């Protein structure tokens, strides 16, 4: 009969054997996983099968980026791609835009392209109310061309034909929106993209509306630009438009500060007495009628308001300080509103 000590020794050797087997098994698994990861990330070039374009939307999570790549059959192993990005701590560094992946890329090459931002096209947002100069600067900031070149094209090389009328330049006709712009497009082509979008966003009955308002379409667009710069709340834009039309009908100067400011090289918080004495055609305190061109790019709500103004007898409005305005029919009412809201 074996001694108790021998039994203990045999049990110990058995445990050691199990431990060794476990370590060896784990080693085999880790080794296999490492080989799989290496092959999936650095060697496998099965996908994409051909040159493939993929759009990464602005604000996409990394999961959404992986889904977009997988949907376009760019990744052979989404899991390995996720692990690679996590290991490099770059899963939050992917740049939005449109990418063009050559055929047969490794996951490593795909990730590097995304992190470096080697886009075929980039997203650019042009807000409502931007002037042509501000749009030129925004495009240049996205490396889409030189700002001075854009300014020349927008402001000094002619306009477009709208409703049978040729515009003086492109101020007001560069539609504000978010665009996916090809990085190799010329400034002329970019200008065409923006003006084509403007034409699409015009009301379908723009010509009929302008005729009913006894204005040309470019004149209504100029009014829309004034509404854009004056209004903050969309529900007030038709009322602001009605004030402009009412004053034009009566031959009253529009007295719109934003129009005077259009000529300034930089923003003025307060319009001074000296500013009001300017003889610029954009000084709507000294000159009746509309300024010679739009003063900014109107968005869809302002265009709709200008082509479809509210019916009102209002001739004045003053900002209340909360994004809305107080409207008045008479100068006495207006002065009371000014005293109330511009303390």
Image (cartoon, rainbow, N blue to C red):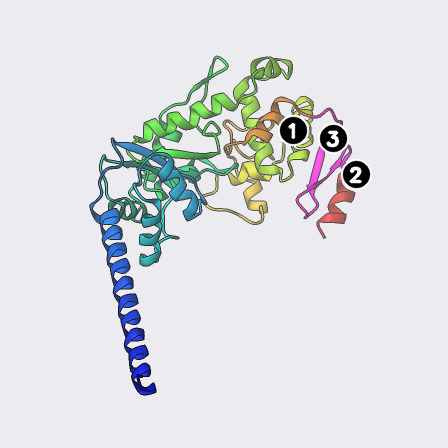
Answer whether residue 162 is visible to the viewer in this image.
Answer: yes
Residues under labels 1 and 3: Cα distance?
10 Å
Q: Earlier in the sequence, mark 1 or mark 2?
A: 1
Quarter where residue 318 is shown:
top right
Dot in front, 3 or 2: 3
Q: Residue at x 65, y 22 (%)?
A: 308
Pair 1/3: label in front: 1
SS label for mark 3: loop
Q: Quadrant of the N terminus?
A: bottom left
**Does the image show residue 168?**
no
Pointer 1: what residue?
241
Q: Residue 66 versus residue 183: which sits nearer the camera? A: 66
Horizontal side, residue 78 vs residue 232: left or right: left
Q: Is residue 318 magenta?
A: yes
From the viewer's side, name the closer residue of 153 and 61.
Answer: 61
What residue did someone put label 2 on? 333
State the separation of the CA atoms marked 1 and 2: 19 Å
Magenta highlight range: 310-332
**Which residue appears at 33% of the width and 27% of the height?**
188
């Amino acid at each position: 009969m074996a001694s108790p000590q021998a039994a203990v020794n045999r049990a110990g050797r058995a445990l050691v054997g199990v431990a060794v087997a476990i370590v060896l098994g784990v080693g085999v698994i880790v080794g296999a996983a490492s080989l799989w990861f290496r092959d999936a990330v650095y060697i496998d070039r099965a996908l994409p099968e051909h040159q493939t374009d993929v759009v990464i939307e602005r604000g996409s999570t990394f999961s959404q980026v992986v889904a977009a790549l997988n949907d376009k059959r760019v990744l052979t192993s989404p899991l390995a791609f996720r692990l690679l990005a996590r290991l490099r701590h770059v899963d939050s560094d992917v740049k939005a835009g449109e990418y063009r992946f050559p055929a047969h890329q490794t996951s490593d090459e795909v990730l590097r392209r995304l992190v470096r931002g080697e886009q075929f096209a980039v997203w650019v947002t042009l807000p409502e109310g931007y002037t042509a100069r501000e749009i030129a600067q925004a495009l240049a900031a996205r490396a889409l061309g030189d700002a001075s070149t854009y300014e020349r094209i927008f402001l000094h090389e002619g306009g477009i034909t709208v409703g049978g009328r040729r515009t003086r330049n492109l101020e007001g006709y560069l539609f504000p929106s978010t665009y996916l712009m090809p990085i190799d497009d010329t400034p002329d082509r970019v200008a065409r993209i923006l003006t084509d979008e403007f034409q699409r966003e015009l009301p379908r009955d723009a010509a009929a509306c302008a005729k009913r308002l006894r204005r040309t379409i470019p004149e209504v667009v100029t009014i829309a630009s004034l509404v854009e710069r004056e209004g903050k709340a969309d529900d007030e834009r038709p009322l602001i438009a009605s004030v402009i039309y009412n004053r034009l009908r009566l031959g009253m100067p529009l007295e719109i500060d934003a129009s005077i400011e259009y000529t300034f090289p930089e923003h003025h918080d307060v319009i001074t007495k000296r500013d009001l004495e300017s003889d610029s055609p954009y000084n709507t305190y000294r000159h009746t009628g509309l300024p010679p061109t739009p003063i900014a790019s109107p968005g869809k709500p302002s265009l709709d308001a200008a082509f479809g103004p509210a019916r009102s007898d209002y001739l004045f409005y003053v900002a209340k300080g909360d994004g809305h305005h107080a409207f008045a029919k008479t100068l006495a009412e207006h002065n009371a509103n000014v005293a109330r809201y511009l303390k």
